Each structure stands twice: as C-alpha cells, then as structure tokens.
Amino acid sequence: MQAQWHVADATIMGTSVHVELWHPDVRTGKALVASVFDELRRIDRLMSPYKEASELSRINRDGGQHTVKVSAELVSLIRQSQRISELTHGAFDITFASVGFAYDYRSATRPDRGRLDALHSGIDYRNLITDATASTVSLGRPGVKIDLGGIAKGYAVERSIGLLQQHGIGHALVTAGGDTRVLGDRRGRPWLVGVRHPRARSKLITRLPLDNEAISTSGDYERFFEEDGVRYHHIINPRTGDSARQVQSVTVVGPDATQTDGLSTSVFVMGVERGLALIDSLNGYETIIVDRHGELHYSQGLEAR
Ligand code: AMP
Ligand code: MG
C-alpha cells in the first residue's frame, strides 16, 4: 500500500510545490511526478514576470507600443483574467502590476505618493486588448504592465491535474504555494487540506475535507514588510495602488483551481461583505474569510456544512 503513494516536493514558480499521487508501479509513479514538475516549469517559463525571455515579459516590454503575438495558451489565461475582472468589477486586475512592480517586499521598498500617483493610471483592465483568433495582446498604452501572480499557480495546478488524469490517475493532490487541486479522494477517505492561521505560522484555522475539488488561500502574510505599524503586502487594491487591508486571509473552495486562485485574490481585495456576496452568487464555490480583526466569516454553503 505505502509504496504506491508517490510523494515529492520541489521549489518552482518561486514557491513550494507538493505532489502526491497513487500508482501501483514505482517507475511510472516517479515519471508522472517528474512530468508534473516539468509542466509547472514550462508554465513558469511562459508566464514569469521575472524571466526576461518569458512571453509575459515580452508583452510588458512591447505591448504598450504595439500588439504582441504570443501563444494561444497565454492569451487564453489573460482572457480568463479579464472575465474575473468583469465579474469582480475590477477588484481582480492583472494590470495592478503597473504599480505593483514598484514594490519590493524583500527590500521593504514601496513607491512614494508622487510615484504611486504617476503609475496608478496604468491600472485598468479595460486597457488590455486581447484577440483570441490572432493570438495577440496589447496593453493599450505605455506604462501598463501585467502580472499573472494572482492566477497562474492555480492554472498550473489545474493543468498538472489534467495531465495526471490523461494518464489514468484517479487519486492525486498537487499544491503550488497557496493553491491546491485534488483528483478523486485519498482512496476511500477525503483529502484533508489545512487552512493556515494568518497570524500564527504553525496553527491551522481548520481542515477541509476535499474530494475532486480545488482550494486556494490568499494571505497578507506571504510577502510583506511593515513600516510605522502598517503592513505593505503583495495583494494590491487596484483602486488605490496600495495593499488591500480589509482582511487577513481568504480561502476559496470550488471545482477549478484557476478560478479558486483568481477568486481568492479577488475576495481579498473586495473584503467581507462584497466578497461573501460574490461567492454566494457563484454555483459550487465557497469561502472562509479571516477579517482584519481575526474573525471568521463563512459563505452560505460552508455555514451549512
Ligand atoms: P494570491 O496569493 O493568489 O492571492 O496572489 C497574490 C499575487 O497576485 C500577488 O503576488 C500579485 O502577483 C498578484 N496580485 C496582487 N494584487 C492583485 C489584484 N488586485 N488583481 C490580480 N492580481 C493581483
Ligand atoms: Mg489567487
């Protein structure tokens, strides 16, 4: 029994990746784990804003001047991001990066008021023009930048699970940072995925039983620095260009990891009231929100569970 669970960890896309899958054959199991890591690296090469040769970097370099031709896959994920922007009235917006690139959480750097004001006009998902038929992207005007950090890990996890499914795998879990998708159950019992306490590293607020579902958590504790008691962290409110401060963490559960990833970032920006209303309006999605006082809020379906 034990030997047929294949478990492995790696650091890819700047985050911890964890894979578990069930396969009776040791060699095949190992090869499938390796193919998941390869898939995550492939997506990182395509979409990383830090890799100069990525297609995303090419869009950021040239897309303000003219239309850029990229892979259908990248256009498709950008279009999915645009749909989430519309759904959330701009709370989710990949052009946040127009300001976002001026923050460096490791070196505690942030734009001053003047710089922020100057960069802020670059944030507006309506600047982005995508053409699925021509497979092109345009940023609309100079000064606009994009970053898929709020959705790419979920997408990569979803793709990895799809790949395992194609190879006949029925039981697996793939995690990249705060995004997880499970395939099937854990052979007779549900997978249990812990939700981290946003202010106590080793504590969990709960463990959720999952079967063939995705779960994403967005938190203000992942990348941040503090200055004069104010926490500057990596989730940006597109309206202000400053970190979103309504909540400490958001977990979203649902059928698709690309969506749970995009939605957890969205709800983080939207806050408790608008966030719960959004998730309650979507079929199959649930959320747990830890507000800025540390209080828990549940969507209707979880409240019932
Ligand atoms: P997550 O952990 O999925 O919430 O993703 C956080 C990442 O999303 C950040 O590190 C940024 O790359 C990106 N991001 C930050 N603010 C936004 C926003 N308002 N809309 C879309 N992506 C964002
Ligand atoms: Mg996200």
Image: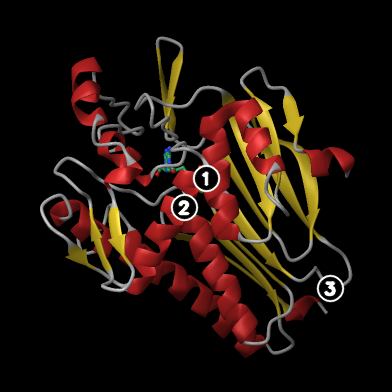
Q: Is residue 117 left or right of residue 291?
A: left
Q: Which mark is first along the chain, 3 or 2? A: 2
Between residue 89 and residue 239, name the one nearer to us. Answer: 89
Please, what secondary structure does the residue beneath circle 3 have?
loop
Residue on which the image places disc 2: 83
Amino acid type at circle 1 is Leu
Instruction: Give the residue displayed 28% in from the left and 71% down from the top.
Output: 135
C-beta proximity under 8 Å, tags 1 and 2:
yes
Instruction: Give the residue displayed 36% in from the left and 32% down from the top.
Output: 105
Query: x%, y% of residue 51?
Result: 25, 58
Q: With respect to residue 192, does 287 lie above or below?
A: above
Label 2: few (<14), some or many (≥20) within 10 Å? some
Q: Is mark 2 within 8 Å of ligand 1?
A: no
Q: Residue furthest left?
A: 65
Q: Is mark 1 within 8 Å of ligand 1?
A: no
Quadrant of residue 141 within the rendered picture: top left
Determine the CA span between mark 1 and mark 2: 6 Å
* Count of numbered marks: 3
Residue on which the image places disc 1: 87
Query: x%, y% of residue 163?
Result: 56, 79
Quadrant of residue 7 within the rendered picture: bottom right
Please, what secondary structure does the residue beneath circle 2 have?
helix
Residue 220 in view here: no
Query: x%, y% of residue 95?
Result: 32, 43
Please, what secondary structure does the residue beneath circle 1 have?
helix
Q: With respect to residue 101, does 225 lie above or below?
A: above
Residue on which the image places disc 3: 187
Amino acid type at circle 2 is Arg
C-beta proximity under 8 Å, tags 2 and 3:
no
